[in-house]
Image (cartoon, rainbow, N blue to C red):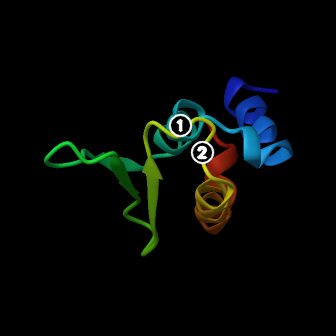
Amino acid sequence: MTRKDKLLQKIKNNPRGASFGDVRQLLMDVGFAERQPKSGSSHHIYYHTALEQVVVLVKGHDPLPEYQVKDALRALDLLGGESGKD
């Protein structure tokens, strides 16, 4: 099991306890691009060219709200098999 697979399993098992850094790392590992917040905003926007879905994470909320983690997991599911690749 790869590091990425372990992280994904950890987040799926406990979406209420997922940290911003863990979810961010998982999204970046599968090819999401990050748009940095403007004017001191805490909202980080992640997008993938193969998806029309955008994932928004709010930095400073550790653990992240469960709905944000579930949005990220849904986006990974939409990518299908790509989330399991190295």
Q: In this view, does 67 lie above or below 34?
A: below
User: Which residue, given by chain and number where applicable, does mark 1 sit on?
Assistant: 20
Task: Say whether residue 41 is left or right of residue 16.
Answer: left
Residue situated in front as seen by the camera: 46 or 78: 46
Mark 1 surroundings: few (<14), some (14-19) or many (≥20) residues within 10 A? many
- Quarter that holds the N terminus: top right
Which residue is farthest bottom? 52
Q: Is mark 2 on a helix, strand or loop?
A: loop
Report crowding for label 2: few under 14, some 14 to 19, many 20 or more residues within 10 A (C-alpha): many
Q: On screen, 76 above or below 26?
A: below
Report the residue at 68% width, 39% height from top.
18
Distance from Cα at disc 1 to Cα at disc 2 = 6 Å
In front here: 84 or 71? 71
* Amino acid type shown at disc 1: Phe
Q: Residue 64 carries which label?
A: 2
Q: Where is residue 75 in the image (x, y as percent from the top left)?
A: 58, 63
Expressed as whole percent of the image width and height from the top left, the position of residue 73 reads 66, 57
The image shows residue 7 at horizontal and vertical percentages of 71, 32
Total of numbered circles in the picture?
Answer: 2
Element at badge 1? helix
- In the displayed structure image, the side of residue 12 where residue 56 appears, left or right: left
Q: Do the residues labelled 1 and 2 touch (CB within 8 Å)?
A: yes
Chain-order first, disc 1 or disc 2 = 1
Give the amino acid at mark 2.
Leu
Q: Where is residue 49 in the image (x, y as percent from the top left)?
A: 37, 63
Q: Which residue is drawn at 35% across and 51% down?
A: 43
Q: Which residue is outermost to the left?
A: 39
- Residue pictured at 75% horizontal, 35% vertical: 5
| Residue at horizontal 58 percent and vertical 35 percent from the top | 62
Decide: is 25 above or below 81.
Answer: above
